[in-house]
Amino acid sequence: MDKIRTIIVDDEARMRRGIERIVRSYGENWDIVGTFSNGIEVIEFLEENETWVDLLITDVKMPEMDGLTLMKEIKSLNPDNDFSSIIVSGYDDFQFLQTAIREGAFDYILKPIKRSDFFEVLQKLENDIDEKRRKSLKWRDLIKQADKLALTKQTQLLSEAVSSEPEDIATMYWTKDFPDGLYQALFVSVDEFPSRTSEYSNEDWGAFAYATENIIDEVIMEYKNSKHQQLGWWWREGGLHFWVLLFSSSKENNDFFVTGDTFSRKLKSCLNKYTPFSFSVAQSNPFEDLCIMPEMKKQLHSLIRMRMIYGGNQVYSPRLIKELKDTEENNWFAANNMKGFANKLTSMLGRSDTSKIEKELSDLFKKIKKWRSPMEIQYALEYLMIYMFKVNLEDTESGIVLSDLGYILQAIKVESNINELENLVKQTFIQVHKKQLAFQQDPTLTPIMKTKKWINENLSQKITLQDISDYVYMNPNYFCQYFKKQTGKTVFDYITDLRLETAKELLQEQDLKVAEIARLIGYQDTKYFSRLFKQRWGSLPSEFKKKYKTML
């Protein structure tokens, strides 16, 4: 048992020393951290040392601050600290004594003090504190277990959100179980070295994965413990590829981005040090709405592809891409003027006629078709697509993001028909070009008006965040921030509110079954719809319908 931290207060020095001797003689479980002549000295001591006490032994009547006031002051200093009090009282202090007991004093000792009476009180108090500590320890263990279960559940939800197809945004109710604040998503991926893979057995790869998981877990724990209200989750995507989600209660985007960058570099350094591989990290910009997690997968998977140009063992983010120095001057890209062509072509997007862009690409492929090296063709097209991705990623307001970059690069790698490759590249460029044009036009409707109009027209359909952001030509993260700033609601809340308002109207105006109404407003799961309806309107849809009919 930990020692019981004790403070003794009495304005009579002889009485203080006598109480101290009795307490010390009782046993070694008592740690007397100070003796004082009045309550003000006690408060000053506690404030200066930022310490706590388990037991206050105090006289009732003292000059400047009596014992009852001292008890209240100590409680106000640290409301979460459960301490006990023993009141020392004279026979004429009975009214004070009654008040002290009501204020929560554990027991009292009457003057003159008898050692046997004092020992009896200390024994009861020691047992009481021991029982409280055991209960407190058990309670803390239960809280830890509950937190662990909650963390496991949250991690599973995040993993499913990233690995599965985008859900209807209004069914992502699980996001409400996460705190409000800023988030950053990180994709941590091993830099593959095919020439070395044969050196390791399956057992080796299992050990590497286990070591990597432990390293990520330790760095996240350090992050969570470094500052109040910082949280982190991680899960494995497969192989030596992992996801990390960081949370901060801070609202400062720039500060949190720097924190995330520091975390990424620390994690990368530890992985380099304790595994035989290098790792790259794709880091998102801070965001508030977890509904964009499915889109984050596409963006960060595309972002990690930057290592094909700039090399591995780096941290890639939308902001840091601008700071990366070009490293291709001395390789074959410069010889074929690919950098200059990529710059020219991307500058035409959203500005030139579609026919001119198609002609530039046709001229390029006439030259490419004359190359003898399939590897050069692959690298040239990969460079072109990554360059366009980089340029569009920097434009966060229009938010034209080539989220399917991973798919396109894979197609370039495996496609053997040069004409098919030409069609793929042309289609991609024209698609982005049209999005750029659309973003600059249509002044009659604001993005919010367009969004609400589209949601109303598609309320009965599956609605994903990507569907909406594609329609208004915005990056999903930027769109979520813009929508909340303009409407005061998240996209999730707006769609849910609209669907439940519509359901209420349908129940009042139409003679339809609950399942039919659920489908009409976009919910395939009737039970889920009913639960949401009751949370909003206080009764199940069937009950609401009956009550409404009886009122007519």
Image (cartoon, rainbow, N blue to C red):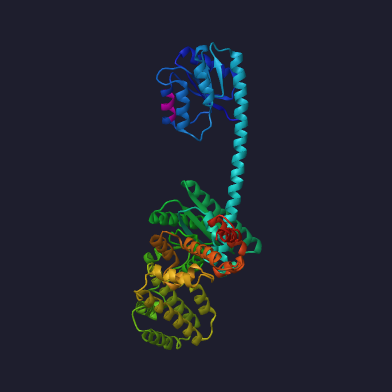
Q: Position of residue 336 (x, y in %)?
A: 39, 81
Q: Position of residue 455 (x, y in %)?
A: 47, 69
Q: Residue furthest top?
A: 112
308 in the magenta segment: no
Instruction: Let me know if residue 191 appears in the view.
Output: no
Instruction: Let me know if residue 270 appears in the view.
Output: yes
42 in the magenta segment: yes
Identify which residue is drawn at 42% across, 81% down: 430
Tell me where residue 242 sits by quadrant: bottom right
Q: Work out which quarter of the rendered image holds the C terminus and state it.
A: bottom right
**229 sits left or right of 510 in the view:** left
Q: Position of residue 348 (x, y in %)?
A: 35, 79
Instruction: Report the span colored magenta.
Output: 41-46
**496 sits left or right of 390 in the view:** right
Q: Work out which quarter of the rendered image holds the N terminus and state it.
A: top right
- Look at the picture and state if 314 lies above or below 460: above
Secondary structure that dominates the magenta span: helix
Identify which residue is drawn at 34% across, 82% down: 352
- Could you say which is closer to the camera, residue 150 or residue 174? 174
- Look at the picture and state if 146 lies above or below 7: below
Tell me where residue 196 sits by quadrant: bottom right
Total labels: the figure holds 0
Q: Position of residue 105 (x, y in %)?
A: 54, 24
- Look at the picture and state if 236 lies above or below 97: below
